[in-house]
């Protein structure tokens, strides 16, 4: 049957007559493993642990857990108002437990035995502690949230190349992508309409891409060549595949042609 028991510890003045030489410079804060109680070695492991984190502390001596107030004062460890669980345990573990909590019922002097090892002692006995291994930082890389294509392609773009060849200054045109629509500007007959992304392809949403259909003329009044229109329409034909080598580069490619864009800032 499990329960709890409580004990209250004596004031520091109670150990004033102890023939001990506590280490007043020692900082015992942290996680420790209980390796011996009153000179008898313990099995160690997580069942024999001592945590010193003023103003609180906790301890286990093989079975039950105890915790409560804890202070470090002039080289002494002083506990108070501790509560200990009261489960039945194997007799050999109960022996460590009864002795360990009995020792902690009075202030204990902190004595440095060697690097990473201290002894807590008073007239009732001693508790030997060894620093618990530090938990190594996780080596798992943080999860990176990568925006999907529908987010990445939104913005203003300017054409830099068609079918692998640079676009001349006079033939440059722009592409505007919103969350639901696309439109080109600067081509005689522009592409404008709703879109959706399916398996990495830019697809018209419900119907083929709508093109404007008008005759185009140059400043001299002569009909302008339609070569640029034809190449742009070929790249958009049948839903081009979207590739983004960098966040500022966009490549739309179909079986009939390709256009490379650069993001406008």
Image (cartoon, grey):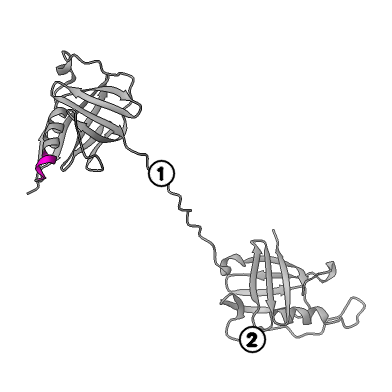
Judged from the image, the secondary structure of the residue bearing numbered disc 1 is loop
Q: Quadrant of residue 67?
A: top left
Q: Earlier in the sequence, mark 2 or mark 1?
A: 1
In-front residue for pair 9/93: 93
Is 148 above or below relative to 127?
below
Residue at the farthest right position: 220
Residue shown at 84%/66% (left/top)?
A: 169
Give the class, few, some or many, for how many residues have Cα within 10 Å of label 2's Cα (few <14, many ≥20): some
- What is the span of residues highlighted in magenta in the rendered image? 89-94
Q: What's the distance in space between the residues labelled 2 and 1, CA to CA?
A: 57 Å
> Can you identify the residue that label 2 sits on?
208
Q: Quadrant of the C terminus?
A: bottom right
Is 146 above or below relative to 234?
above
> Can you identify the residue that label 1 sits on?
136
With 54 as the anchor, is 212 left or right in this view? right
Give the class, few, some or many, for how many residues have Cα within 10 Å of label 1's Cα (few <14, many ≥20): few
Residue shown at 81%/69% (left/top)?
A: 167
């Amino acid at each position: 049957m499990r329960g709890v028991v409580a004990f209250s510890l004596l004031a520091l003045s109670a150990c004033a007559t102890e023939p001990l030489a506590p280490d007043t410079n020692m900082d015992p804060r942290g996680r420790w493993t209980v390796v011996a109680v009153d000179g008898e070695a313990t099995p160690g492991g997580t069942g024999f642990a001592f945590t010193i984190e003023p103003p609180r502390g906790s301890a286990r001596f093989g079975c039950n857990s105890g915790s409560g107030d804890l202070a470090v004062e002039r080289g002494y460890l002083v506990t108070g108002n501790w509560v200990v669980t009261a489960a039945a345990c194997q007799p050999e573990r109960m022996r460590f437990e009864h002795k360990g909590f009995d020792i902690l019922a009075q202030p204990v002097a902190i004595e440095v035995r060697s690097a990473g090892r201290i002894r807590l002692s008073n007239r009732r006995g001693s508790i030997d502690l060894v620093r618990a291994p530090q938990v190594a930082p996780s080596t798992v890389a943080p999860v990176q949230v990568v925006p999907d294509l529908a987010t990445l392609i939104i913005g203003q773009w300017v054409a830099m190349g068609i079918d692998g060849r640079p676009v001349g200054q006079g033939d440059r045109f722009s592409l505007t992508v919103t969350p639901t629509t696309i439109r080109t500007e600067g081509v005689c007959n522009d592409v404008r309409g709703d879109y959706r992304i399916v398996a990495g392809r830019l697809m018209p949403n419900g119907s083929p891409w709508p093109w404007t259909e008008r005759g185009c003329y140059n400043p001299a009044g002569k009909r302008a060549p339609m070569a640029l229109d034809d190449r742009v329409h070929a790249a958009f034909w049948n839903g081009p595949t979207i590739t983004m080598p960098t966040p500022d580069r966009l490549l739309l490619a179909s079986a009939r042609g390709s256009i490379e864009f650069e993001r406008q800032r």
